[in-house]
Image (cartoon, rainbow, N blue to C red):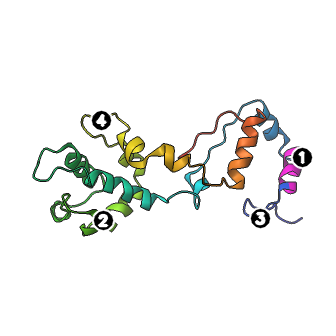
Amino acid sequence: MPPPPTAADITVSQTLDLLDGALSSVAAGIVRGLYAFWLGSGISRGRVEDLRKLITRVLECLQQRVRAGDATCRFRKALQEIMQLAGLTSGQCAATDVERSISDWPTLDTLVERLVTNYARFLEVQVDGELPDYLLWVCVDVAHTYADPAIEPDAEHLCLAMLILEGVASDMPSAN
């Protein structure tokens, strides 16, 4: 008997056969709302900016708001917290002049790479005097980044939307 197909090469017909046969109890559980679909952040890969570009955009958003010469600037403080979160050394932090464009930062690549694996905490960094999700709503600009009507949804997005419309799935937590 051949091995079952993997997620990478299974067809829709084979999937439906499994859900009608060997995995019918799973299908019944989905219909009864016993399961939630977890949508990994990769579902939007190729449709919206990758994390490196998004992180760079957030850093640039903060840097552009830094007040030159103001050691207590709230945006400077947020950038310093981000550098600590990324584990930059004191020397690396000192070499990163937040008053200069991020393209001039010698630590930019290191900073971005380290934040990619820690992006949830990165996006939780707060800016004094702003709402808690400032980085998400202002710098990432979630509404325009992920709800751009010019971006065509992938087949995965459409299938998930159909499951919701059909009432088969109501909960779909996502890293997005």
Secondary structure beneath disc 4?
loop
Task: For marks 3 and 2, give the CA distance.
Answer: 38 Å
Residue 47, horizontal then vertical, whole percent: 59, 58
Residue drawn at x 41%, y 51% as measured from the top left: 119
Q: Which residue is mark 4?
A: 130
- Circles 3 and 1 in contact, beta carbons < 8 Å: no
> Sequence order check: which comes first, mark 3 or mark 4?
3
Range of the magenta residues?
Answer: 13-21
SS at badge 3 = loop
Q: CA distance from mark 1 to mark 4?
A: 53 Å
- Residue 85: x and y in percent read 29, 51
Disc 2: which residue: 108
| Residue at the image point whose x is 83% and y is 55% from the top | 12
> CA–CA distance between discs 3 and 4?
47 Å
Q: Earlier in the sequence, mark 3 or mark 1?
A: 3
Mark 3 surroundings: few (<14), some (14-19) or many (≥20) residues within 10 A: few
Q: Amino acid at mark 3?
A: Asp
Mark whose residue sits in front, 3 or 4: 4
Foreground mark, 1 or 4, reads: 4
